[in-house]
Image: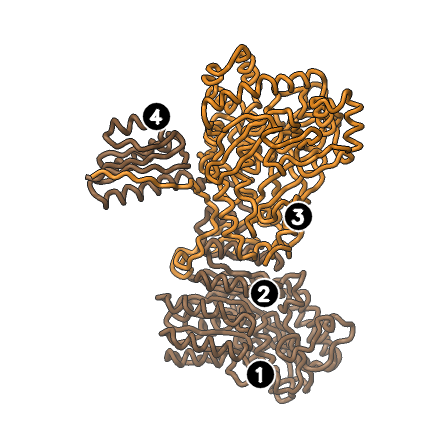
Chain colours: A brown, B orange
């Protein structure tokens, strides 16, 4: 038999709660008698009456007395005591009527939430604080917000790395976790390919191509477009790789990124090599495979035949002739799709852009009265163009305006645009883009020019908008539509160079 | 076998939700059931609901005082989580025992001409009506002036006059909070951290010095308190031994008191505790003393306040901590002090309470907010525990749903909960404790204070009671100062 008496000074609990706790302790297997009470004179007498030694204690001390079979039972009893007292003194709901107002910050909400992931989409200036709340409460976090300073991104990702938590973002628009689309993501079939993406639309492109080829995705973890920069150093990519390596549903991993810092890409490749699962690197850059080629490598590795990637030709009566050689204008909503097109367009010579290492295009030039000259690839999703307005995947206005202006410019031979389908995207992009394409092509025709419009349409049949339904309507408006962004860009480059066949 | 052990639990079930900082506790994002907490755009929550994924939306708003950069800088302070945990633990662990009753002259070393007052530092030229009235009464009480006019002249000239905040001397005072050498004070001790705090004896309601009244009736009562009440209480407390004030506070919350504007149960429990000793040690004035204490439902306020002061003083001077350790008003300015910024006061203009008025008084008769008694809210009582005191809410111009909603909203700006102060109607949830200036700046939710209202004209006394909030400037300035002190 073990008799244990313990005094805990400075702990106050009301008598009803303590009677409930005493009762719970007495029902633990092997416990003969138990008393948990404030050490009032009455309770100390009770204690003596139960045959316990009476300790030195006063009415503001908690006394715990247990009479039980052995030390193991005592341990059980103590566990029960801790649970009971914690259950009482911890944050009860305090709801009374089941109604509790929503909390105003992530931190307060997480005190009573079992959420495993916090999705932050507040303005960039406030995103850090909310995301930090998530990490300090040991939850994973996805930061959709853009315009978050890089030093805040680094601070978040260092905290995440310390705690074994994933920080997706900032400026992470795309993720799929356990089949649930977070932000912009497509309805892809479930499968065994895990994707780590320092690029939202790049990941959407790869997952849609895999889907078209019959391969599914386990999880798609976005890490934000700056993760593989020299500053951030791939902190989240490494964390995501480790999580996918430990995930039983994932058999192989694809890392998708915009052009990355070479030493960071090397470091990530080094981590990837030690994971015990095959990892494919699809990091865009001059001389690197484009996303379609990288996807094809995955298919080959798995032994799946590379399909003919879907193309929809413009339908008569608006079917165009090949234009004369002229300017290529790439108007992109997706940053990685823009980056991929920029790499492919380089064979035309000088291409002005607001992204990439040689970015020389100021956003103001796009709004100037006179159309900016020369080949162009514009990323309308870039921070400088989204400050204070919705992302072009939600609000097409700015891009449609540029389409009209550049399309009417007599030097323009071909316009290439991306359209991204899936969750959170425009529910019917063809409704606004179709008439705009038709109008700009008619305007060119009225000037005696042929203007080609190429659409890179990223999506799946299972998407709410349906790839084939949107492609058909864009085709009717006079556009040539590609699932592969690289194929779309190459087609546009050929037309701009004057050596494209009529579609 | 018989074992006897002694543990020293601190009673700090904090419920802060700030995590433990260990990677081992990280949730499995890819394996555990996915539930998403969304902060920001509605469309993400909608999209998740469409996919039948459990969503918990946060009711987020942009920080209403601006200051995003300061907020981010303070949040980023690596010392903050641990510093706030320490600050809250100290507040929750602090004890408060009444150990003696003494004249202010000996307890605080006050000399004639020195007056302590409520709130942040103040000069006569900026002092409001009730503050001037109370100082005038203090001059008359101490025999430093013959007439109110003469008292005001001397106070205005400032010769041989020293005005200092009670808070600067380990003391607190309700309303004007004026303490002069001949007044008697309660002396409280924190056996856990070793602190000491003082507070005057409560005069009752109506025409009283702390509300700025200084008529003969007021001065006569004060003299009786120094001559009879103080010595009687001293004898009783010394005979009784330390009285555990924190234990009484815990019980009063379960008896319908919130410890600021309702102290009825607390007063009765104190009297019950001391009654035997009052009788044994008392002389012919015992009945008078008992009737005075029993007839003043606010008597115990002057013990709740120094108990709160002890708990919050234990959390002072913790670098990186964003917890408020004092809220106090001098009738002109509302000031706060913060654990991470030493003795600095962050002030803004005191607001005029809204509530109910006595007799024919109206809003035009009320002085802006005054008194150190908001130390009770700083400790999680008063407005923060209004849900515990449904009987008070009509007196301060509210209703029961308001009381519940007020307490619930205070959890949004506090670092934790006090398990010793369970609120029955909230399923014994602990009182919201430890105001976080960072949370206030992020949410714009301001602390709710229950308070009395003094007449704006010196000499009037109490005109009503009501609800008031601090000016947001205090919190904005505190966040700015914390941001400047980040490493």
Q: Circle 3 marks a residue in which chain?
A: B
Q: Circle 1 marks a residue in which chain?
A: A
Q: CA distance from mark 4 to mark 2?
A: 60 Å
Q: Are marks 1 and 3 in contact (CB under 8 Å)?
A: no
Mark 4 vs mark 2: tell me if same chain.
yes
Mark 1 vs mark 3: tell me if same chain.
no
Image coordinates for residue B76, horizontal then vertical, percent: 56, 57
Q: Residues within 10 Å of mark 3 (few under 14, many from 20)?
A: many
Residue that label 4 marks = A41
- Total labels: the figure holds 4
Question: In this view of the protein, which residue sits in the foreground, B153 or A299?
Answer: B153
Is residue B156 in sight in this rendering?
A: yes
Of marks 4 and 2, the one in the foreground: 4
Q: CA distance from mark 1 to mark 3?
A: 56 Å
Mark closest to the chain's N terminus, 1 or 2: 2
Give the numbered dot on residue B476.
3
Residue that label 2 marks = A151
Q: CA distance from mark 4 to mark 3?
A: 50 Å
């Amino acid at each position: 038999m073990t008799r244990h008496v313990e005094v805990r000074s400075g702990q106050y609990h009301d008598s009803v709660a303590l009677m409930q706790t005493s009762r719970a302790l007495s029902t633990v297997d092997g416990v003969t008698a138990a008393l948990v009470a404030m050490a009032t004179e009455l309770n100390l007498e009770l204690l003596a009456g139960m045959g316990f030694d009476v300790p030195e204690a006063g009415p503001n001390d908690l006394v715990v007395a247990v009479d039980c079979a052995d030390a193991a039972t005592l341990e059980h009893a103590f566990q029960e005591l801790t649970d009971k007292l914690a259950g009482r003194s911890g944050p009860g709901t305090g709801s009374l009527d089941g109604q509790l107002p929503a909390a105003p910050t992530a931190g307060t909400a997480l005190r009573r939430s079992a959420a495993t992931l916090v999705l932050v989409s507040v303005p960039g200036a406030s995103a850090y604080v909310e995301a930090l709340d998530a990490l300090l409460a040991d939850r994973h976090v996805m930061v959709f917000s853009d315009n978050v300073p890089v030093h805040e991104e680094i601070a978040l990702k260092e905290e995440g790395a310390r705690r074994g938590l994933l920080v997706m973002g900032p400026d992470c628009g795309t993720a799929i976790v356990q089949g649930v689309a977070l932000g912009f993501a497509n309805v892809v079939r479930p499968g065994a390919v895990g994707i780590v993406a320092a690029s939202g639309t790049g990941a959407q492109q790869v997952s849609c191509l895999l889907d078209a080829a019959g391969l599914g995705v386990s999880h798609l973890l976005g890490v934000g477009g700056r993760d593989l920069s020299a500053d951030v150093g791939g902190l989240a990519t490494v964390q995501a790789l480790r999580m996918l390596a430990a995930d039983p549903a994932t058999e192989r991993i694809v890392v998708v990124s915009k052009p990355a810092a070479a030493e960071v890409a090397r470091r990530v490749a080094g981590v990837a090599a030690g994971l015990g699962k095959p990892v494919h690197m699809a990091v865009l850059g001059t001389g690197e495979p484009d996303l379609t080629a990288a996807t094809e490598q995955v298919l080959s590795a798995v032994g799946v035949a590379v399909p003919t990637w879907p193309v929809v030709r413009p339908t008569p009566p608006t079917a165009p002739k090949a234009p004369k050689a002229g300017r290529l204008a790439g108007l992109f909503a997706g940053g990685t799709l823009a980056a991929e097109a920029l790499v492919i367009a380089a064979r035309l010579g000088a291409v002005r852009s607001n992204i990439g290492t040689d970015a020389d295009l100021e956003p103001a030039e796009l709004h100037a009265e006179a159309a900016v000259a020369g080949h162009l690839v514009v990323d309308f999703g870039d921070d400088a163009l989204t400050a204070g307005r919705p992302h072009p995947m939600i609000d097409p206005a700015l891009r449609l305006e540029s389409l009209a202006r550049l399309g009417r410019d007599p030097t323009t031979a071909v316009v290439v645009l991306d359209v991204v389908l899936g969750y959170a995207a425009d529910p019917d992009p063809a409704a606004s883009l179709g008439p705009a394409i038709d109008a700009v092509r008619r305007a060119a025709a009225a000037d005696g020019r042929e203007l080609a419009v190429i659409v890179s349409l990223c999506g799946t049949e299972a998407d709410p908008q349906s790839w084939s339904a949107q492609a058909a309507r864009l085709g009717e408006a006079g556009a040539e539509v590609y699932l592969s962004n690289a194929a779309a860009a190459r087609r546009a480059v050929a037309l701009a160079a004057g050596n494209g066949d009529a579609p | 076998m018989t074992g006897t052990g002694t543990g020293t639990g601190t009673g700090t079930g904090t419920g802060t939700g700030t995590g433990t900082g260990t990677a081992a506790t990280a949730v499995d994002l890819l394996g555990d059931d996915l539930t998403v907490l969304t902060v920001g755009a509605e469309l993400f929550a909608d999209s998740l609901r469409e996919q039948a994924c459990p969503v918990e939306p946060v009711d987020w708003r942009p920080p209403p005082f601006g200051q995003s950069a300061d907020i981010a800088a303070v949040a980023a302070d690596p010392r903050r989580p641990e510093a706030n945990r320490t600050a809250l633990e100290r507040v929750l662990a602090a004890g408060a025992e009444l150990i003696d009753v003494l004249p202010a002259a000996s307890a605080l070393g006050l000399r004639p001409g020195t007056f302590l007052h409520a709130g942040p530092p103040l000069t006569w030229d900026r002092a409001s009506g009730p503050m001037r009235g109370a100082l005038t009464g203090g001059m008359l009480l101490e025999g430093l002036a013959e007439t109110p006019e003469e008292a005001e002249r001397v106070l205005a000239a400032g010769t041989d006059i020293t005005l200092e905040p009670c808070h600067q001397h380990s003391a607190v005072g309700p309303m004007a909070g004026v303490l002069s050498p001949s007044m008697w004070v309660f002396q409280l001790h924190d056996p856990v951290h070793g602190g000491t705090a003082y507070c005057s004896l409560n005069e009752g309601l109506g025409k009283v010095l702390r509300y700025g009244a200084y008529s003969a009736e007021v001065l006569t009562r004060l003299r009786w308190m120094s001559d009879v009440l103080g010595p009687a209480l001293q004898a009783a407390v010394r005979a009784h031994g330390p009285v555990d004030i924190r234990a009484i506070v815990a019980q009063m919350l379960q008896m319908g008191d919130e410890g600021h504007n309702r102290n009825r149960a607390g007063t009765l429990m104190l009297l019950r505790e001391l009654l035997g000793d009052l009788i044994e040690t008392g002389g012919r004035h015992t009945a008078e003393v008992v009737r005075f204490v029993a007839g003043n439902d606010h008597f115990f306020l002057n013990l709740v306040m120094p108990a709160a002061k002890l708990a919050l003083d234990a959390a002072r001077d913790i670098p990186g901590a964003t917890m408020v350790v004092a809220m106090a008003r001098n009738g002109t300015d509302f000031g706060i002090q913060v654990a991470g910024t030493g003795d600095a006061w962050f002030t803004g203009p005191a607001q005029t309470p809204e509530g109910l008025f006595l007799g024919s008084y109206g809003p035009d008769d009320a002085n802006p907010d005054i008194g150190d008694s908001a130390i009770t809210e700083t400790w999680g009582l008063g407005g923060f525990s209004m849900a515990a005191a449904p009987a008070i809410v009509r007196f301060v111009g509210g209703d029961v749903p308001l009381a519940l909603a007020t307490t619930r909203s205070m959890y949004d700006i506090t670092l934790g909960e006090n398990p010793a102060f369970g609120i029955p109607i909230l399923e014994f949830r602990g009182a919201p404790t430890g105001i976080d200036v960072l949370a206030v700046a992020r949410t714009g939710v301001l602390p709710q204070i229950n308070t009395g209202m003094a007449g704006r004209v010196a000499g009037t006394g109490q005109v009503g009671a009501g609800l008031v909030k601090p000016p947001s400037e205090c919190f904005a300035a505190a966040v700015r100062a914390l941001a400047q002190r980040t490493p």
